[in-house]
Image (cartoon, grey):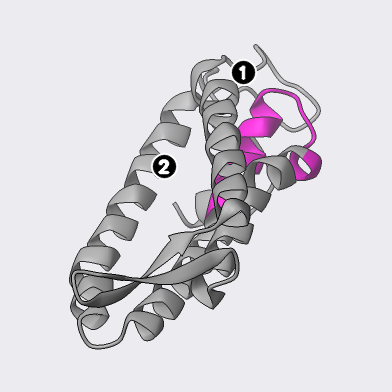
Amino acid sequence: MVDLLTTFDGRISRKSFWVAMLAGLAVALAFVLLVVLPISFASDRFARLLSSAFALLLIYPLAAIVVKRLHDRNKSGMPWALIFLAPAVASSLMHGTGIGHAERILAGRTVLVPTAGGYLVGFLGLVAAIWMAVELGLMSGTVGPNRYGPDPLAPPV
């Protein structure tokens, strides 16, 4: 499991990709429910910064998973990983700093509402996420060994 989240070498199957994505989603959801929401009642700005910092911490293991899955598809990892992950990084930074957002009063609380720039980055993130889900989560990998390693679905020798 440590290699799955920390190295950029080798290949992983679609099943491993989805298991890692669901595990990451569960961790992020638990963090929001147990940490960010309670803090947000005390300080919206601190909660925004905390959630953005946590999202940025998740980028490295996510990049490792994405690169390995790209390798299984016999594609170079870095250019594609940047296309898939750059909108998520930009969105996290923008939300944490308030760039691309405007403050509004809603039910007596100050909330951040995306401006045109925030919506554009969010839209690009959605497109990248859908593309990534199709490319990495639905399309099969290269059968047999490729330049990145042995087939993760091949029976052990």
Q: Kindly identify the amino acid type of the residue bearing the numbered disc 1.
A: Gly
Whether 117 is drawn above or below 138: the answer is below
Helix, strand or loop at mark 2: helix
Front-most of 41 and 54? 41
Q: Does the CB distance between marks 2 and 1 fall below 8 Å? A: no
Residue range highlighted in magenta: 62-79
The image quarter containing residue 9 is top right
Instruction: Tell me how many marks there are.
Output: 2
Name the spot of residue 105 as percent of width and height, x first: 31, 73
Kindly identify the residue that appears in the image at 38 percent across and 51 percent down.
24
Q: Residue at x 35, y 79 (%)?
A: 47
Identify the amino acid type marked 2: Met
Answer whether residue 23 is visible to the viewer in this image. Answer: yes
53 in the magenta segment: no
Is residue 63 among what the camera can see? no
Mark 2 vs mark 1, foreground winner is 2
To which residue does mark 1 refer? Answer: 141
